[in-house]
Image (cartoon, rainbow, N blue to C red):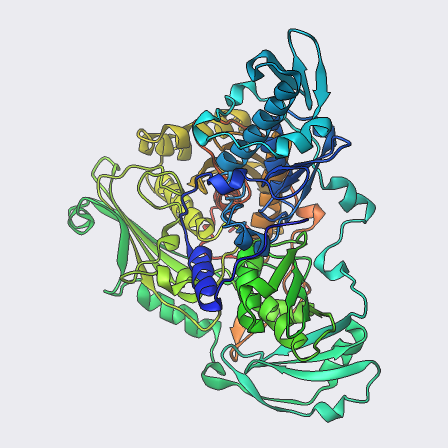
Amino acid sequence: MNTTTMPSVSRRRFLGTSTAVAGSLVVGFHIPDQALAQTAPGEINAWVVIKPDDTVVVRIARSEMGQGTLTGLAQLVAEELECDWSKVTTEYPTPGQNVARNRVWQNFSTGGSRGIRESNDYVRRGGAAARLMLVKAAADGWGVSPNECSVASGVVTHRGSGRSARYGQLAEAASKLTPPAPADITLKDPKTWKIAGKPVARLDTRAKVDGSQVYGMDLKLPGMLNAAIKDCPVFGGKIRSFDAGAVAARPGVKKVVQVGDSAVAVVADTWWHAKTALDALPIQWDEGPNAKASSADTAQTLKAGLTANDAVSAHKVGDVKAALGQAARTIEAVYSYPHQNHACMEVMNATALYTRERCEVWCPTQNGEAAFAATVEASGLPAARCEVHKIHLGGGFGRRGMTDYVRQAVAIAKEMPGTPVKLIWSREEDMQHGRYHPVTQCRLVAGLDKDDNITALHMRISGQSILAGVFPQNVRNGLDPVVFQGLNPPGPEASMGYTFPNLLVDHAMRNPPVPPGFWRGVNLNQNTIYLECFIDEIAAATRQDPLALRRKLMKNSPKHLAVLNEVADKAGWDKPAPRGVYRGLAQTMGFGSYVAACAEVSVNDAGELKIHRIVAATDCGHAVNPQQIEAQVEGSFVYGLGAALFQECTLKDGRIEQTNFDTYPTLLMKHMPKVDTYIRPSGGFWGGVGEPTIAVAAPAVLNAIFAATGKRIRDLPLKNHSLKKA
């Protein structure tokens, strides 16, 4: 694709800007004038290219990692464009092109379930602007007013004469027109949608089914070599020495390269030759200050934080201390949540080609701009001489928002100028050098009056801050806002649905040496477990129905209550469950959406758990593709239940003990329950769907287990507990 000449951008200026963008939590968007300018034949604007055969290419800046964002965004553009959906295809613009065109595609980051909800407005405007230009091109050619023309399925028709023209015939003329002013662009009412809002087939399914889809690990370039890498297994450790000569004569080996202070890579003709040579390479490690660190040490540190005086608060109502002191009685519980690995099926990988004049990278990434910034920095070249080509991701879940593997690939390629080098991590490397779900503990104390009404709630979270480990510039006065997901005051992102007369939610930051990261669902996952299971504890202690108690606490939260009522109704909460089956509820609001679940489980005399069914309800405001949303809800339960049942990463002697799926199992088909999904978009807002439902998986099941066994599980995974009835 032709683009304008990339402007000269200093490395310092670009890296500073890219870091700020990558670290932003909230970004305001508008549609810039540059977005409506054309730079290539057939390009109507930055989002729409129309070919003579009527093929419509929609450019998608966000990443596709299985969640359906590519199809959903294309639907929104196509809806406003009024094109023939059967002619739609997509392509990724590159972050280098984005820089060259003054960030016309805006945010390349795909995380926090923001792919559609934060770009829907400007991509829709891009489609609408392109439609107006195509209609005007037709009207100009016929010498009539655009108001006399209509458009449907990529064909413009003049109502008076019946003349018509296809988009492919009009594209060249339309591309030469002045784009409409933003004020002249009116978006459709979602009630009138014909393409968006419908369960159309995904655009990427066929390629995935027939095997033609190229992932990062599939990429082949002429003359390409392969690299395997090994980092110090102890977090914070370094390389002391290695003997490259010991493997230099092994089959296919081209070079042994030190990568930074802590890693070494072998470059060979095949990855297997590189990997087996690396396994044979004698390496001496300086294990550093964390050589004896353990999960037990971390647990003790977090436990001390539960009563420490250095906590910061993000949600406070009334005077909790006084209210607890005056309570007729109190209920207290301590919960905990472990480190977990993303464990993407496609391990970290990137391919880099470096010369003194240019550096290019091909990689699966959730943040093309962050990968671009990493390429610029690692290569030492100006931004104008670098590029990143994004490839579909074989799983991301937050892990591929990081750029460590990109930096490594570029560093290795610099040692082999002019030769493309594909770096692939082994599964063991991927498991032991992830960016892990943060470890936390939570102490909850509720005060009750003589009538068992809740008068106060104190939630103290002690544990790891993701922002402190990833974007420390976003931690201010010791406050990491991400820690409080789902526990915030009423707002559009991730707020608590319950109202308490006195409430304090605070955090004592404790950061172990295990590096944290944004793991699908992030802190909403454990926060929902803590709150929803504790609400059930209060219900049990006060002999109240768990649904009735929640309803009583939700008088000021109609959207929270609506999804909760939906699952209760569809699950038949007011009717007896089948013999031996027990139910549990959970609800939350996160990533802009309201979700709830009712789990149905049984536990036999041997303590074996069976999850029979989960009923789920989602209010995401607007539903762009109901079929994709349903799939995302089901996939969320796969992810959330796998974590709840089996997954934890433990630290011993400064290193992660789990090295592959034999020690870090995932959910199998036999474990998966039937999922009934109810999508209830109430309109007026745009919520995410890729992550929020994960959060209600575990607490709904845990509450059902309590109903079945009387056992309250307060730390995960469940594999560490016996469910045999007492």
Vertical relation: 517 (above or below) 212: below
Quick check: 69 left or right of 472? right
Q: Is any part of residue 118 visible from this angle?
A: no
Q: Is any part of residue 481 visible from this angle?
A: yes
Count the marks.
Answer: 0
Quarter-wise, where is residue 183 in the image?
top left
Q: Residue most toward the top?
A: 160
Quick check: 40 left or right of 9? right
Quarter-wise, where is residue 451 in the image?
top left
User: Of residues 463 and 422, which is closer to you in this image?
Assistant: 422
Q: Percent position (x, y) of residue 581?
A: 58, 36
Q: Percent position (x, y) of residue 552?
A: 32, 30
User: Of residues 554 and 611, which is closer to you in this image?
Assistant: 554
Q: Residue at x 31, y 29 (%)?
A: 555
Vertical relation: 383 (above or below) 529: below
Q: Percent position (x, y) of residue 327?
A: 19, 45
Q: Residue at x 66, y 53 (%)?
A: 393
Quick check: 342 left or right of 41? left
Quick check: 559 left or right of 251? left
Vertical relation: 402 (above or below) 163: below
Q: Percent position (x, y) of residue 335?
A: 41, 56
User: Of residues 713 and 479, which is closer to you in this image?
Assistant: 479
